[in-house]
Image (cartoon, rainbow, N blue to C red):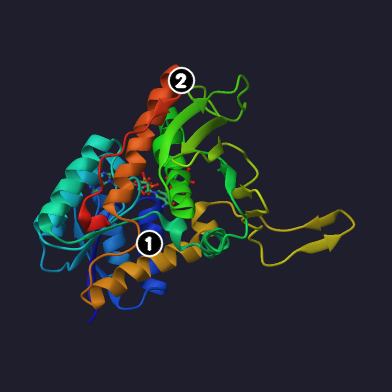
């Protein structure tokens, strides 16, 4: 069976996934594409031999589509996900689930009413070999009691339309999810610190870098450096500090060069380069579940909702600099 995919949102990540479906993924074909920019939709439909749509609902309800793949901007996600649920079609949605927790709650309630998991969320780091290996190390108990974590989320640059709030609900979302994945517990408090100094490379409206401090249920304290105009590359770092040992992600480069200048290796320049394997695996997971007639697995709407709750607290702290508690309601049985 070839799963017929309808892909909505043909920007940076949408095009990357389109190419992935064309070159890497087995068992699926993109039969329909949609973008509010008609020229973009027409051009990519022609290039990939798909049908162009300009309204998401029309693509979602089309017989050309078995499963919906959402890569539009965050504020458009809720309506498109609910429309896919109404059509009874499985849906992959890029992160964030929605920009606010209240909107995410509506998605939880709708999916629970449907009685089955229909959605996989695009927290691709859970499919990254490095993070998976780190989780195994933690699970085996080699580190002893975990006390601290140091994370860094460095992007070479961000466009002018990237707002300070996006540092929390677009970038830090990845750390919030991966902290929960690695430690198997929830975040209960957040504080955002604005260092007095900011990089000259950021647009005037941005405070960059930021430091976010998280605290988990058991008391693990995590610092996350968000530096989205770091200039030198796309560099994602994570170190877990235990009582007996410390473990972290390694450099990702496959080769290392020795020269008179010393040792050097390549540093990725985009998320598409750094997480290529993770994206391949998350998308194949989505397709395989549909091909086998199984419910969705991997990051869920619940994960998206909890991350949105942490982001809401982070946004409040961005305004007042205070520590904000995160209150997480009981998890519905569907996601247990
Ligand atoms: P982008 O701005 O480059 O592209 C978004 C596209 O969606 C544009 O072509 C726009 O015209 C289209 N669009 C907007 N509203 C639409 C609507 N209602 N219906 C149809 N099309 C619509 O953005 P991007 O960087 O590709 O990001 C898209 C989404 O993917 C965001 O949610 C972002 O957070 C996420 N993302 C995830 C990762 C990751 O690492 N997992 C990386 C980049 C982006
Ligand atoms: C972007 O939307 C992503 O999801 C990238 O993975 C992240 O590194 C970047 O900061 C976000 O803007």
Camera-side residue: 191 or 168? Answer: 191
**Would you call the spot at circle 2 few (<14 residues within 10 Å), some (14-19), or many (20 or more)?**
some
In the displayed structure, would residue 261 be above or below residue 211? below
- As drawn, the label of residue 17 is 1
**Mark 2 Cβ and ligand 2 under 8 Å apart:** no
- As drawn, the label of residue 260 is none
Q: Which residue is at a point 20% across and 75% down the rendered structure image?
A: 293
> Pointers 1 and 2 in contact (CB under 8 A)?
no
**Residue 147 pos. (x, y %):** 59, 43
Mark 1 and mark 2 lie on one chain; the one further toward the N terminus is: 1
In the displayed structure, would residue 8 be above or below residue 210? below
Mark 1 vs mark 2: in front: 2
Name the residue that disc number 2 marks: 322
Camera-side residue: 306 or 261? Answer: 306
**Mark 1 Cβ and ligand 1 under 8 Å apart:** no
User: Could one spot residue 55 in this view of the protein?
Assistant: no
**Residue 154 pos. (x, y %):** 57, 42
Determine the secondary structure under disc 1: helix
Q: Say left or right for 120 vs 184.
A: left
Quarter in which the C terminus is drawn: bottom left
Quarter in which the N terminus is drawn: bottom left
Q: Quadrant of residue 267?
A: bottom right
Q: Quadrant of residue 155?
A: top right
Q: Which residue is at a point 11% across and 57% down the rendered structure image?
A: 114
User: Could one spot residue 176 in this view of the protein?
Assistant: yes
Camera-side residue: 102 or 141? Answer: 141
Q: Which residue is at a point 62% across and 26% down the rendered structure image?
A: 200
């Amino acid at each position: 069976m070839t799963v017929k995919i309808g892909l909505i949102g043909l920007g940076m990540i949408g095009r990357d996934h389109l190419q992935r479906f064309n070159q890497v993924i087995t068992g699926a074909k993109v039969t329909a594409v949609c973008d509010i920019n008609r020229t973009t939709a027409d051009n990519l439909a022609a290039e990939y031999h798909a049908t162009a749509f300009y309204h998401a609902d029309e693509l979602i309800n089309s017989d050309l589509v078995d499963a919906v793949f959402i890569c539009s901007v965050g504020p458009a996600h809720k309506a498109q996900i609910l429309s896919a649920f109404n059509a009874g079609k499985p849906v992959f949605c890029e992160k964030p689930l929605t920009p606010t927790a209240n909107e995410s709650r509506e998605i939880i309630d709708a999916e629970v009413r449907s009685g089955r998991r229909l959605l996989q969320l695009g927290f691709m780091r859970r499919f990254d070999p490095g993070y998976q290996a780190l989780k195994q190390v933690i699970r085996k108990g080699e580190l002893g009691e975990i006390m601290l974590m140091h994370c860094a989320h460095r992007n070479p640059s961000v466009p002018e339309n990237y707002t300070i709030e996006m540092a929390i609900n677009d970038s830090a979302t990845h750390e919030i999810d991966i902290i929960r994945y690695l430690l198997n517990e929830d975040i209960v408090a957040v504080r955002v610190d604005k260092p007095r100094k900011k990089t000259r490379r950021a647009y005037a409206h941005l405070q960059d870098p930021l430091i976010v401090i998280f605290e988990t249920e058991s008391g693990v304290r995590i610092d996350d450096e968000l530096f989205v105009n770091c200039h030198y590359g796309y560099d994602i770092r994570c170190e877990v500090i235990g009582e007996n040992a410390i473990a972290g992600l390694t450099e990702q480069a496959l080769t290392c060069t020795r020269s008179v200048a010393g040792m050097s290796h390549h540093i990725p320049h985009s998320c598409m380069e750094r997480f290529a394997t993770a994206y391949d695996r998350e998308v194949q997971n989505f397709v395989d579940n549909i091909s086998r007639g199984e419910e969705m697995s991997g990051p869920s709407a619940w994960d998206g909702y909890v991350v949105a709750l942490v982001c809401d607290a982070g946004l409040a702290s961005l305004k007042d600099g205070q520590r904000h508690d995160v209150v997480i309601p009981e998890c519905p049985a569907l996601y247990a």
